[in-house]
Image: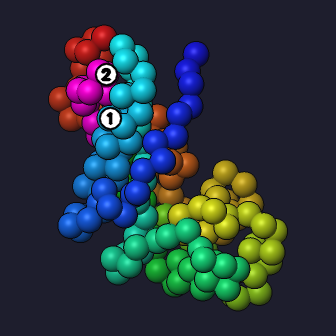
Amino acid sequence: SFDADAADLDEDDLVKGISDPAEQALALAREKALHVAKRHPGRWVVGGDQVGVLDDGTPLRKPADKDDQVAQLLEMARQPHRFFPAVALVKDGVVVDSAADSVRVVFRAFDAATARAYVDSGEGAGSCGGYEIKHRGAQLIERVDGSLQAVLGFPLLLRAPGYHMGEHF
C-alpha cells in the first residue's frame, strides 16, 4: 500500500540555472521526494517528475489555453519531442537512489482541424505538451522510441546504471 502526497513546490525555482532537461527532471524528483519525506519520517518516499522538450530544445509546457494547446500540438506534429522522466527514492532525508530516462515521441502528420478536435475533447489541457498518451492522445502518435511507461510519466522499468536489486532493500 502507499499514500500519495503532493510536494506543492515552486518547480520553476527548483530548476533555475539548470539547462539540461534530464538534470531538471532529476532535480525535481529529488527535491519533491526530500520535501515529502520530511512529513513521513521512517518511510520510503518515491518522488518523480518529467520534463519535455521539442527536438529543437523548446520546452514543452502545460497549455495556457485552447489556442496555445492547438499551437503546441501542431508544433509537435512538425518535429519530434522528448520526455525526460526521473525518479528518486528517499528515506529520512537521504536520497538513496535516483535515475532518469529519455524517450522520443514522433507524432503522425495532422492538420489544425485534427488538433482542434483533440483539444475540444477536453483532454490534455493540464498536461505537459497538451496531450495524454493514455487516452485519445495515443491517436496523435506515430511511434515512441523508448519506454511507454516513461512517456506516461513514471518509468516503471527504469534501472539506474550499476543498480542491483537488494543493494538497498
- Residue 112 against residue 142 in the figure, above or below: below
Judged from this view, the residue extending furthest toward the front is 39
Q: Which residue is mark 2?
A: 91
Give residue 110's position: percent from left, percent from top: 67, 82
Q: Residue at x 36, y 13 (%)?
A: 42
Looking at the picture, tell me which residue is in the foreground, 144 or 81. Answer: 81
Query: Magenta residues, as a range?
Result: 87-101
The answer to whether residue 16 is visible is yes
Residue 102 among those drawn in magenta: no
Q: Secondary structure at mark 2?
A: strand
Crowd around label 1: few <14 · some 14–19 · many ≥20 (10 Å): many
Residue 45 percent coordinates (x, y): 40, 26
Q: Label the magenta part by its dominant secondary structure.
A: strand
Which of the two residues, 107 or 6, is positioned nearer the viewer here?
A: 6
Tell me the tag on residue 4.
Answer: none
Side of 151 relative to 89 (left or right): right
Toward the left, the furthest residue is 162
Give the structural element (helix, strand or loop) at label 1.
helix
Mark closest to the chain's N terminus, 2 or 1: 1
Q: Residues within 10 Å of mark 2 (few under 14, many from 20)?
A: many
Q: Amino acid at mark 2?
A: Lys
Image quadrant in which you'd find residue 94: top left
* Residue sitting at x 56%, y 80%: 72
Question: Disc 1 marks which residue?
Answer: 34
Which residue: 26% across, 27% down?
93
Q: Amino acid under label 1?
A: Leu
